Amino acid sequence: MAEIISGYHYDIGGREVYEDRVNIQSIVTPGRLNLLVAVVADGVGGENKGERASQTAIDTLFQYLRSSTETDVPTLLINAVQAANQRVHPITRETGGASSTMAVAAVHEGHKLYIANVGDSRIYLCRDQALTQLSLDHTYANVMPWQGQISPDEARLSPRAEALMRAIGPRPEVPVDIGFYVNMTDPQVAHGRGLSGLPLREGDSILVCSDGLTKVSSRTGTPFTTPEEIVRVLNTQEGEKAARSLISFALGRNADDNVSAAVIQMPDLARHKRAQRPYFIIGGATVTILLVAAVIVYFLLQNQGRQQAFLSATATAEAISANVVGTSAAVSADEASALAAAVTGTAEAAATQTAVVAAYTPTSTPTQTPTATPRPTLIPNQIGVFFGAGEPVPFPLADSITTESEFVQLSLNNDVSTIEEDAVIFAQPDTQIMFENVTSDSAAEAGISLILYEGGDIFVETGDYKNGADISPIEDTRVSFLVSGSCMSVQYDPDGGTIAVACYDGDCRYRAEERDELTPLTRGNLLRYDVLERQPVETRRIAASDAAYYQNILLRSSAGRSVYNQCILPLFPPTPTPTATVTKTRVPTATPASSSGGDSSPSKPTSTPVPKPTSTKTASGSASLAVLPGLGAVGLTTFWLGLGAVLGLVLVADHPLGRKRP
């Protein structure tokens, strides 16, 4: 069986903070379930850390899936979402409202779909040119009738109809919906369908998305991305490219929310053919125009003098051909999303937004994360493993570790049950580290103490180690830099003179002596510290180049991508990539168009005038005249029109617009 295609993409849209989270992973569970899982979580809370809730929800979901021995897929999904809710619930209480939606689509053994849903992120099936919403939004309009409190009509007409009634985090437990809602709203019937799963067919596409992709614009009254656009994209494009194209429609209509989309697609040999059909229709139009122009040429030769009239008509035909062929080149399958964005105004919308740096948008998001390599069982005195080019290798406490030519990832967790989430350290080549102490006897006391040697370059994410990581330079271990709760980068220059520490998230502090009070380092700031003088040299905002540098490091591994979303992304959210506007040159007409003084829209491109023919016969003209057969007017006209009609009908018939839709 051919490989399933998957991919995802996201954009901050019209918000100041990216609170969505999206991911796709291939997992073989301890219970021997082979799953491809796509999940979207839409954080709620704004300044109350909605992004923290959504990231925690997704991380917990995948952690549960990778550790569960459950052998029933619906039960596994319900329990995994419940586990995510239990981890987010304390965050909701701590922040005063941060929560998240969660929509999960899981394909089992490559052929059967199961889903789980809490909130109003959606799961769609695209099959046979039709789009069907499988999940049902947990809004007031839908949930209240289930509870028997009001009628469906009363709920639908209520001012609170769109209010969210279920989310991850607000309560210790949340009802997880696994139902397939197709042509009905009965939760009991939908639940029964969900237990059985949905067998997938060749060519099926599953879309999991946040509401920012499909909700109705308050400005225009139309969806940011229409069902017809979703069907067209999923039937002609695949994986990440399809997700990017869908999001481009929403951005082109000035989406007022974060936009995230994950796509899982069954193999379809016809998908690529459908993507090429625009070539055929435009090519057919080109041939037809040229043939009609040739007929016009013939009659001009007959009525206005062969040589001069032929040259004039030929120049006109060439100009028409150049315009149509130019349009054909613009509408390639690789640029379909760019054209869609240009039509809906993405280029103008992107130009008005505040750009951070184009480099912050990941350029090579993997379409499918491979199953994590099993880590070896640690023995006493071993505190973690490091991942490089080969298999994960355990490392002991108090031993110096030196990275070689390859980037490595060090995961710390000495198998104590209180630590669920590893601390992860991403080290660049030629970095030497020694772990002095790793404490995880209890969740409250868990912490890491390490020494960084000259020339070292690391990015630290502290995971469940509540006391964080305490990092000291080898030159003077009395100087220390502490991060707890999240992420910090540390660069120790090769000469041992200064150390640069950037606080990407969490509680960051530093001190020059062990007995000194810890001095806070503000999130988003970089401190350059003179190790020998034991004093700060510079404090500034983290530069764009610094964030881009660590982005390239983090995006090399699945754990790094999760850290990137949590740490760098909130500070430097991705911005819509400016889309080149496709400009079409106007076909020259016999009568010049007059400009309107009252038209405030951008002026149309001015067509390039066709040079007036001269009386001198050109080589091209001679060759063209030479190929005209000595036929009469009726015979030549019939020949050209017949050939054009046949080619045009064949090419148009092959295009979806020329066939009856199923």
Image (spheres, grey):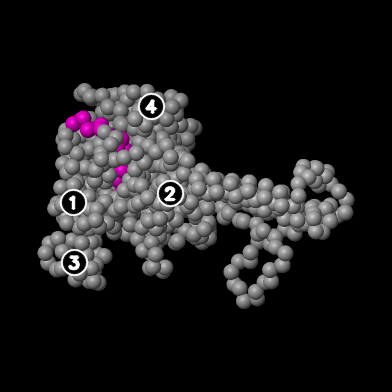
Label 1 element class: helix
Image depth: mark 2 or mark 4 in front: 2
Labels 1, 4: front one: 1
Reading the image, the residue beneath label 2 is: 233
Q: Position of residue 227 (x, y in %)?
A: 38, 56
Q: Looking at the picture, tell me which residue is in the foreground, 271 or 600.
A: 271
Across and down, in percent, residue 80 comes to: 20, 43
Point out which mark residue 244 bears: none
Q: Quadrant of residue 156?
A: bottom left
Mark 2–mark 1 Cα distance, whole angstroms, equals: 28 Å
Q: In the drawing, does residue 137 fall left or right of residue 556?
A: left
Three-letter code, disc 2: Val
**Which region shows up in magenta?**
25-40
Nearest the viewer among 344 and 608 is 608
Mark earlier in primary sequence (2, 3): 3
Q: Which residue is mark 4?
A: 388
Left or right of 75: which side holds 308?
right
Q: Nearer the viewer, residue 62 or 553?
A: 62
Indicate whether residue 435 is drawn in magenta: no
Question: Residue under circle 3?
Answer: 152
The disc, 3 or 1, on the residue closer to the chain's N-terminal end is 3
**Marks 2,4: beta carbons within 8 A:** no
Tell me which residue sits at (52%, 53%) in the image.
339
**Callout 4 environment at 10 Å: few (<14), some (14 to 19), or many (20+)?**
some
Judge the density around disc 2: few (<14), some (14-19), many (≥20) Cα neighbours within 10 Å: many
Q: Residue at x 36, y 33 (%)?
A: 3
